[in-house]
Image (cartoon, grey):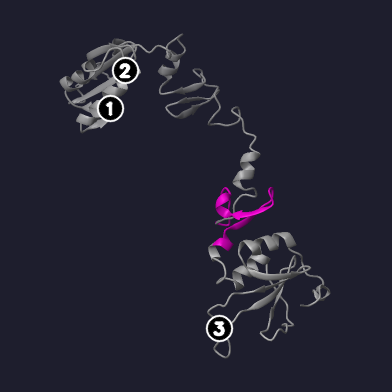
Amino acid sequence: MPNIKQEIIGVKHIKETVESVEKLLNKLKIDYKRHDNIVKLTTKIIPRVDGTGHLRRYSYDYYIGTGQWRSIYSDGTYNETYYKSNGIEDFLTRFFKEDIKHDDMKHIKHCKKCNTDKPLSEYQKYIKNGINIGQSYCRDCRNSSNTWSAKTNPTANPQRMYVNGKYVSTSHPLHKPGRFKTFEGAAFSALKGYEKTPEGYVYIIANPSFDGWLKVGMAIDAEDRCNGYQTSSPHRDYKLLYARKFNDRRTAETKTIYKLKKVVKEHNGEWFKTDRNTAQEIIEGLSITL
């Protein structure tokens, strides 16, 4: 093996260390021997044919930190010409395709924080020039240094307001922390004990504009809920067909809808294409003390 002093002077150095190169070679199970900053790498017997028609191994000297390499002939002599690569990963990808899975080599990335080589799948995506090169830190390191709190996290922040899944700015006149289906629901929730009150009604409401369809839902006051629907109809033609009070209106509504979906083919949310008797029988079949 040539002496380290034979290395060509003036070569641009690459950011790689003896430790990182050896760690990568061991991980990929590449046959090598190291002397100072020079590693001698030998391929497995690969399906290539030399001049006499026999399969053979190929050996190379690679200079760590420079990307330089040169081949070693079968008689042990060295090629006098040095060639250049972009680092150990580039070199292995070009000459050791049969020894390692190309995809494994292609998807290896060094985490700058934990100083570990990990698959690209363990990094969050970072697209550059149309290629995913991954973030600088792996997911484990990012999670361990995550400084987000409930105040800065837009998803977990309890001081934010969402109506029907959409964020509402604090400048909105009806802003109130929490998640609501409607602004009306947000306003009612401000009443003392509104959300904590389990009692209420499970009702059936109909509108002649939706022939054959019934709305089944829950409310603390069924008539008030029906009056609320009238604002969405110019004819104010919503009708409260039936309502029954329960100790736990939420559980009663859940059970009613669950049973209705078993017997009604067409439904959308809380609307069911069925007759009043079918829906009413299911509600009446539930215990008031649910």
CB within 8 Å, label 1 to label 3: no
Q: Which mark is residue 282?
A: none
Q: Quadrant of the N terminus?
A: bottom right
For numbered disc 1, what is the local secondary structure?
A: helix
**Relative height, residue 150 to residue 84 (above, below):** above
Residue 278 image position (x, y, % from top left):
17, 22
Q: Which residue is mark 1?
A: 258
**At label 3, which amino acid type do we have?**
Leu
- Residue 15, visible in the rendered structure: no
Q: Which mark is residue 218?
A: 2
Task: Give the residue displayed 41% in from the left and 18% down from the top.
Answer: 185
- Residue 247, visible in the rendered structure: yes
**At label 2, which amino acid type do we have?**
Met
First in sequence, mark 1 or 3: give its number. Answer: 3
What segment carries the magenta color?
Answer: 104-130
The answer to which quarter of the image holds residue 259 is: top left
Residue 76 image position (x, y, % from top left):
71, 84
CB within 8 Å, label 3 to label 2: no
First in sequence, mark 3 or 2: give its number. Answer: 3
Front of the two marks 2 and 1:
1
